[in-house]
Image (cartoon, helix red, strand yellow):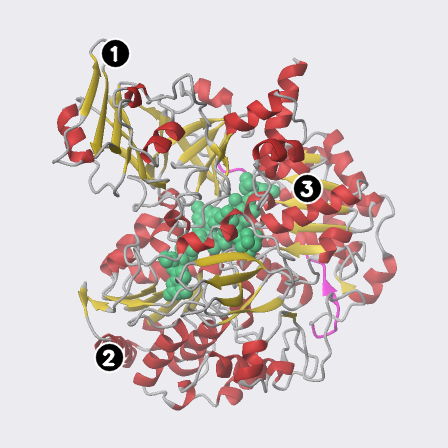
């Protein structure tokens, strides 16, 4: 490309679905900024979105198809996959094969995969990582509304007088929605925010009330709220009578609850409960936002319905500033649901159990078959792989060896499976190890298609980079396999535009307003119109009919057009697990995305947390004799992991939190899903990843180490290690148990055999430090100590990245901390400008007492704003310290 090119596309991370403008300069360098015209973000991007350009490099990319680890041609790979799937089906029937797909596929990819499995192979054994993510919301919606409909839109979050956030760390996981709420609250201080989360997350920064609920206390809480609303005359009797059924039963169960039981199940005092109930009652414009603290639970579907019941009972649904709001995780979680990517759904939001729907879909596709019963849901699918019932499995755009519960068992099942195909963009993942065939897929920036965000808005993802020669888009790969399996006519698409138009036509096929998902207006879209398609919300029927909000006046998608109340009680009983007295909670951090295949490539995003960790309440830390920065072994009946202790009051007593991101590519033993059992919600089949009985103990090492080095470390012989990209290279943390290693030999191994390190040894304390140079530039530095290394990480990284040779100070760097002439920035808080906690604290100490003032003094928080909740906390803690 010789001139600058500018392309409007959509962020490939979370379900907020922000519009992005990518600019490719004449020298091929890429910059990204928020699209000021996109209705999701109006120009803003969070830390992950802002750093997208750093994740586009070809390092770690899977660039050529391979069979049994050997590069091969596309024809050979496709022929083998098609032949093996066909032969397996011929011999063992259609249910002996399966696809495990992802909310990170584009709608067009997803549509083709679902069509192939359900209409042509004739099985419904296609499930998706959305099973681990949105299945309980889908099931709850369908129970209440008769369809999987999100009734509201983002604007409701700004128009509401009360936003209740349940099991959602919005500040870190949907940062732009968080910022929209924070800005609305600043404009209208009467607006209130309630956070319901066992942990005091960064989201608490905007909360007027934080309910540190007991794990899985949510059903009891919202059933208690329903009882309060009814008793105090807040039920909207005319809405209930006109638009719902089942109220009497739900009311009966709710009114039977005793307050003492609600307190016991939620762990909340009567006063706190009253405050919340009163807040909710007093504000008609209320939105309840919920996410994985709700969905990922044995009572996930009941949680969803307990929330929806309160909105139905007050008629607060589908009106400006009102409604239950399930926010989706992945960029195309919604699109996947629309094409029927779940094993228990059909395309275009139709039901697999409904014979009329099956006939619609089969007639539309004119397909030889149509799956007649639900297929295997994710956990059961991998069980079937393990038991040899599934003999050929195709995994696309997901990393189940890390993200599935019972991750070790999943890995073992993959290892034993006769035929595993993995379509991915990354060459080495924990799942790819088990692939017989690896298919290189096009990634963000190369792909062309569409995604749907949390508010039902469909946006285009457009390419702006040249796709590497042997890389292909997912839809193409799927269609080529389908053709080779004998389904040429049904899968001969010229491009994604044609697939999208077909998907749109199916959504409108014999619909007539009877089904929620209808984008009939796009059924005749030609490639040029598809190319130009501006973001729009569904439904958008062929006659142009559209709406931002649904159900204000009923019109549900049940036979009688009425919504259903679902009676909910207290939900889950206590589990007796004396050997595992702690509750292990898992989830996300601000700057990493899932299994780190993308964000792990960005040095900026790898500084906020550079190691896997466990958050522990100080009382538990004391009880288990664990100090901050110790290493901790966390275990359940399934296995153990080794992570760094982070002692914090933000955690509840008896509960610990470990992020889901770290895997074998970045740490020795930190895949937290190795500890999570495959226990699921009975209705949705979604695994309970947030409430796992566990125990922990301090891990005592003989030697602890920290290193920075230019090149990626290849070998770390240690019980514990974790690597992360940093400015100028890589940082490594490790610990060795048993007999202390031969330190000089260890240093040579890590820093490079040819190097001639400067050494500093303190025989009294047993501490050793090494530094290597190339022409006066630091190339590596290693600290070894009998206790966790106290050197300043940020300072060591700054030396590695220094623009000038370090001459004259060779020994000084081994001090491991800045001299009197420089400051220690502390752990990175602002990823955009690399501002550390110490710099922010200093600014606060100098009198900056608002986030804006800190921004003015340090720049922190002035670009994407994702760190603003943390800056606010530092200011708050400083104020508390002064008050003491
Ligand atoms: N930075 C970042 N953002 C992301 C992602 C990412 O990987 N990184 N992933 C995206 C995806 S796919 C998803 S699904 C979303 C998830 O977004 P969130 O659901 O907001 O994220 P989580 O951290 O999984 O869990 C949210 C909270 O649920 C709380 N919780 C645990 N148990 C309970 C409980 O019993 N009741 C209640 N009320 N709360 C509980 C946890 O303490 C946690 O703070 O994030 C999306 N955005
Ligand atoms: N303990 C615990 N476990 C969890 C969760 C939790 O909260 N706690 N959360 C669950 C949730 S909500 C989710 S969504 C899952 C996420 O878990 P995963 O889906 O396993 O996570 P990702 O790292 O996003 O995996 C995406 C994979 O697809 C590849 N990829 C990216 N783009 C493309 C593309 O265009 N085409 C192809 N073919 N490949 C591509 C990436 O390289 C990567 O390997 O984890 C679940 N697991
Ligand atoms: S909030 Fe951040 S991660 Fe989510 S879509 Fe927007 S920029 Fe991307
Ligand atoms: Mo998710």
For the point 70% across and 32% down, the residue is: 260
Say left or right for 788 vs 508. Answer: left
Real-space Cα separation, disc 1 to disc 3, in angstroms: 54 Å
Q: Secondary structure at mark 2?
A: helix
- Where, quadrant-wise, is the C terminus in this rendering? top right
Give the magenta-colored segment's residue range.
Answer: 558-575
- Where, quadrant-wise, is the N terminus in this rendering? bottom left
Residue 566: within the magenta? yes
Real-space Cα separation, disc 3 to disc 2, in angstroms: 57 Å
For the point 56% across and 74% down, the residue is: 351
- Residue 59, by quadrant, is bottom left
Closer to the camera in the image, 362 or 27: 27
Closer to the camera in the image, 399 or 419: 399
Q: Secondary structure at mark 1?
A: loop
Residue assigned mark 2:
75
Which numbered dot is residue 765? 1
For disc 2, the neighbor class at 10 Å (few under 14, some 14 to 19, many from 20) is few
- Residue 857, by quadrant, is top right
For the point 69% across and 44% down, the residue is: 182
For the point 77% across and 53% down, the residue is: 159
Which-is-in-front pick, marks 1 and 2? 1
Q: Position of residue 11 (x, y in %)?
A: 52, 59
Q: Position of residue 747 (x, y in %)?
A: 18, 29
């Amino acid at each position: 490309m010789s001139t600058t090119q500018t392309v409007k596309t959509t962020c490939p991370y979370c379900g907020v679905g922000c519009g992005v403008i990518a600019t490719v300069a004449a020298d091929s360098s890429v910059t990204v900024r928020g699209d000021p015209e996109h209705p999701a973000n109006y120009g803003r991007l969070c830390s992950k979105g802002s750093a997208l350009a750093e994740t586009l490099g070809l390092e770690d990319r899977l660039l050529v198809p391979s069979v049994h680890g050997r590069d091969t041609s596309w024809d050979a790979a496709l022929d083998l996959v098609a032949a093996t799937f066909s032969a397996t089906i011929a011999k063992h029937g259609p249910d002996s094969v399966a696809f495990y797909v992802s909310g990170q596929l584009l709608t067009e990819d997803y549509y083709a995969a679902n069509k192939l499995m359900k209409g042509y192979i004739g099985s419904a054994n296609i499930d998706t990582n959305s099973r681990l993510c949105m299945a309980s919301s889908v099931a709850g919606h369908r129970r209440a509304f008769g369809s999987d409909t999100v009734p509201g839109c983002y604007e409701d979050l700004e128009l509401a007088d009360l936003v209740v956030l349940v099991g959602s760390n919005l500040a870190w996981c949907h940062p732009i929605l968080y910022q929209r709420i924070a800005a609305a609250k600043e404009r209208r201080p009467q607006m209130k925010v309630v956070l319901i989360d066992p942990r005091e997350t960064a989201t608490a920064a905007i909360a007027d009330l934080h309910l540190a609920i007991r794990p899985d206390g949510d059903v009891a809480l919202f059933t208690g709220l329903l009882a309060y609303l009814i008793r105090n005359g807040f039920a909207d009797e005319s809405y209930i009578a006109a638009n719902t059924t089942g109220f009497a039963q739900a009311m009966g169960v709710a009114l039977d609850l005793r307050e003492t039981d609600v307190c016991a199940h939620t762990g909340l005092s009567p006063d706190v409960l009253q405050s919340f109930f009163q807040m909710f009652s007093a504000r008609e414009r209320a939105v309840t936002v919920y996410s994985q603290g709700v969905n990922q639970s044995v009572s996930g579907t009941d949680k969803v319905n307990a929330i929806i019941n309160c909105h139905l009972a007050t008629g607060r649904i589908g009106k400006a500033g009102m409604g239950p709001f399930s926010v989706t995780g992945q960029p195309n979680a919604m699109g996947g649901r629309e094409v029927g990517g779940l094993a228990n759904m059909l395309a275009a939001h139709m039901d697999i159990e409904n014979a009329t729907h099956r006939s619609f879909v089969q007639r539309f596709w004119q397909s030889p078959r149509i799956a007649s019963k639900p297929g295997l849901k994710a956990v059961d699918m991998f069980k079937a792989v393990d038991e040899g019932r599934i003999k050929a499995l195709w995994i696309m755009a997901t990393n189940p060896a890390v993200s599935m519960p019972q991750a070790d068992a999943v890995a073992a099942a993959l290892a034993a499976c006769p035929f595993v195909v993995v379509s991915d963009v990354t060459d080495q993942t924990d799942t790819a190890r088990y692939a017989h065939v690896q298919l290189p897929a096009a990634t963000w920036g190369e792909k062309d298609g569409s995604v749907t965000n949390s508010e039902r808005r469909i946006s285009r993802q457009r390419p702006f980079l040249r796709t590497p020669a042997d890389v292909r888009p997912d839809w193409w790969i799927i269609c080529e396999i389908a053709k080779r399996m004998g389904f040429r006519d049904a899968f001969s698409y010229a491009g994604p535009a044609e697939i999208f138009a077909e998907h749109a036509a199916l959504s409108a096929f014999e619909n007539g307003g009877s089904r929620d998902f209808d984008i009939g207006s796009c059924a005749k879209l030609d490639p040029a119109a598809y190319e130009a398609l501006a973001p729009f919300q569904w439904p958008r029927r062929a006659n142009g009919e559209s709406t931002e909000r649904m159900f204000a006046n009923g019109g549900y998608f049940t036979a009688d057009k009425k919504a259903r109340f679902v009676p909910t009680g207290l939900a889950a009983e206590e589990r007796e697990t004396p050997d595992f007295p702690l509750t292990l909670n898992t989830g996300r951090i601000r700057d990493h995305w899932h299994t780190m295949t993308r964000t792990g490539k960005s040095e900026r995003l790898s500084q906020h947390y550079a190691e896997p960790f466990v958050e522990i309440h100080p009382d538990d830390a004391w009880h288990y004799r664990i100090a901050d920065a110790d290493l901790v072994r966390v275990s359940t009946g399934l296995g153990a992991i080794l992570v760094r202790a982070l002692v914090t009051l933000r955690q509840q007593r008896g509960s610990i939190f470990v992020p889901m991101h770290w895997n074998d590519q970045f740490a020795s033993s930190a895949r937290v899903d190795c500890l999570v059992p495959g226990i699921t919600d009975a209705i949705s089949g979604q695994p309970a990843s947030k409430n796992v009985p566990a125990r922990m103990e301090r891990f005592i090492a003989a030697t602890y180490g920290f290193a920075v080095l230019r090149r990626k470390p290849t070998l770390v012989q240690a019980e514990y290690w974790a690597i992360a990209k940093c400015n100028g290279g890589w940082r490594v943390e490790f610990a060795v148990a048993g007999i202390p290693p031969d330190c000089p030999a260890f240093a040579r191994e890590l820093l490079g055999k040819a190097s001639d390190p400067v050494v500093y040894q303190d025989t009294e304390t047993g501490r050793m430090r090494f530094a290597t140079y190339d022409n006066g530039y630091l190339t590596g530095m290693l600290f070894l100590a009998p206790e966790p290394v106290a050197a300043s990480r940020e300072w060591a990284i700054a030396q590695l990245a220094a623009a000038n040779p370090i001459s004259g100070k060779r020994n000084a760097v081994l001090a491991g901390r800045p001299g009197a002439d420089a400051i220690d920035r502390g752990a990175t808080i602002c990823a955009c400008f690399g501002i550390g906690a110490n710099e922010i604290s200093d600014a606060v100490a100098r009198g900056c007492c608002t986030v804006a003032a800190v921004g003015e003094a340090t720049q922190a928080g002035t670009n994407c704003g994702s760190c603003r909740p943390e800056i606010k906390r530092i200011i708050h803690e400083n104020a508390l310290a002064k008050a003491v």
